[in-house]
Amino acid sequence: MTVSTDRNADDRSGAPGAAPVGAEPGPPAPPDRERRRRFRYTLPGAWVAVVFVCLSFTPSLVPRPGAFMGVVCGINGAIGYGLGVLGAWVWREVADRPVRPTRRRSWRIFAAAGPVLLVAGYLLGQRWQGQIRDLMGAPAEPLASRLLAPVVAALVFAGLVAVGRLLRRGYRWTARQLSRWIGARAARVVGWALVVVLTVGLVSGVLLDGVLGLTDRIFAVRDTTTNEQAVPPTTGARSGGPGSLVAWDTLGYQGRTFIGTGPTAAEIGAFTGAPAKEPIRTYAGIASAGTAEERAELAVADLTRAGGFDRAALLVTGTTGTGWVDPAAIAAFEYETGGDSAAVAIQYSYLPSWASFLVDQDRAREAGRALFDAVYRTWSELPADRRPALYAFGLSLGSFAMETAFSGEADMANRTSGILLAGPPSSNALHREFTDRRDPGSPEVQPVLRDGRTVRFANDPGVAIPPEGAPWTGSRVLYLQHASDPVTWLNPDLILHRPDWLAEPPGPDVTDEMVWIPFVTFWQVAADMLEPVDTPPGHGHTYTLEFVDGWAAVLQPPGWTTDQADRLKEIVGALSG
């Protein structure tokens, strides 16, 4: 970082109100001096940037590779630099003080202390990252990846500051033009307002919409392709097969994967040691029908045609953004029901979950309600002694979609035989309500609601699900949530309020050195949402083997043993591996 004590050579001269906009310009600076100015930084900005970079190393929920850590540090450093420059300008305006050159002694102090703070923060960050990896059983990060962090951070920081200076130049030019017709102070105010509005509009209205539009087009094209493992069905038990009401070509990429894969009757029979049925699966993609309600009706009509309501267990499945259904969750359900099951799902978007979470929550809500209501309507018309046991499932945004079909705990118990929801986002209204109303003394990461009579929560369903020994009769609703899952714990309240999960003893895979810091913790958990590394099963937002024990808790298969659970985990683990 090149520094300067020249009062006109740094960002302070470009702060709002630093000099009369309408003043006559002096002689142009020499080209070499002008180039040097582009790489000079102010002392207040530099100090705050260092603090923000150091805060970037504080522990969060999931491990980060070096390059991603560098991106986070660079962004935070640029934000800190901008706030430092802005704060210095506000102070000068309030105190009515002119811009003064920074003393060389102040720069020397920064030059000595800044690197020490950065190195100390980096080393502490590596220590905390090591703790997180150890808690999750993740492999150690290679040295080359760790050394990449400061390089990437410097590049990102310099790039973002350069963008900020381009915006400042745009403000100056705008203010100069406006000063020809209005006063200098008004020109500065209007100039800043125009630059801010145009920048926000560009980012939200052009860049964000452009990214989402491009993503939508990319995934729409991908939706026309087929997974090489997906085989067109030759049986009427699947949508797209002989006699189906839904054409194979309309199912979409994820729909064809859902329909064209899965365990066969022979594979299930080999696992259970008894004759098994071919599981029924029906699905409707975006191309299958025009609206969510029409797709739901079509999928249920195909379910009826295939004999899904004649099976012992019927599963209504919420999908993620692209229409994806977790293969491990569905396979575990089919194995544990001996194949005497049917599963139905519909697609509501082309976008991946992160994008659907931003713009398609209404579609997810509409799809979840439409599908469950369509199934329930047909199911409720059957004689009571001919109805299959009705279950619901959703992972991540799929849990949001499926949860919206119910009004509360009693509705869940009255209209289903059981529900399994995994990795629920913080926007899940019922999950939030159940957690907030948990019994006193139970932790937020694994709450107990009304002595666990209907709804329970598990970090690891392979061990006893609290409250141990309490009766769990009737329909069972189980939430699977890892203490380290940022999707579950990211909430706007994190900005200004310490959550209970950071005030209470930490979960089994969260370091006890993670603390709440206003604004910082929210941003750290938001960065964790990107999860650029594949966390091991049982941690972060990775749910795989948990479905075996989760479904066993909800379905209560007769004679279920730990040996069967272990063998099934090997099978479903291979599906996600």
Image (cartoon, rainbow, N blue to C red):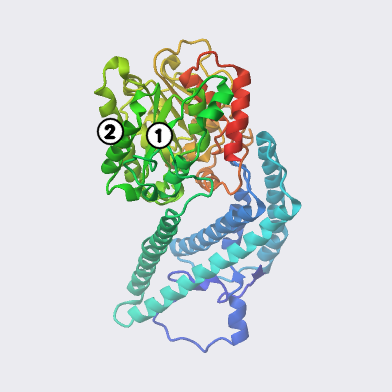
Q: Percent from the top left, x then y, of residue 212?
A: 41, 58
Q: Residues within 10 Å of mark 1 (few under 14, many from 20)?
A: many
The residue furthest left is 381
Q: Nearer the viewer, residue 309 or 489?
A: 309
- In which quarter of the view is residue 173 placed? bottom left
Q: Percent from the top left, x then y, of residue 266?
A: 54, 29
Could you tell me which secondary element the residue under label 2 belongs to?
Answer: helix
Q: CA distance from mark 1 to mark 2?
A: 19 Å
In the rendered view, would you say 115 is above or below 141? below
Q: Which residue is mark 2?
A: 374
Q: Nearer the viewer, residue 267 or 144?
A: 267
Q: Is residue 96 left or right of residue 543?
A: left
Numbered disc total: 2
Could you tell me which secondary element the residue under label 1 belongs to?
Answer: loop
Q: Which residue is mark 1?
A: 237
Q: Is residue 147 left or right of residue 245?
A: right
**Residue depth check, mark 1 versus mark 2: number of the one nearer the observer:** 1
Q: Are marks 1 and 2 in contact (CB under 8 Å)?
A: no
Q: Percent from the top left, x then y, of residue 177?
A: 35, 81
The amino acid at mark 2 is Ala
Q: Is residue 336 left or right of residue 183?
A: right
Say if residue 508 shows up in the picture.
no
- Position of the C terminus, as image quadrant, is top right
> Which residue is located at x 69 percent, y 57 percent?
148
The mark that comes first in sequence, 1 or 2, is 1
The amino acid at mark 1 is Ala
Q: Residues within 10 Å of mark 2 (few under 14, many from 20)?
A: some
- Position of the N terminus, as image quadrant, is bottom right
The residue furthest right is 143
Q: Percent from the top left, x then y, of residue 185?
A: 35, 72
Say if residue 207 shows up in the picture.
yes
> Which residue is located at x 27 percent, y 46 percent?
291
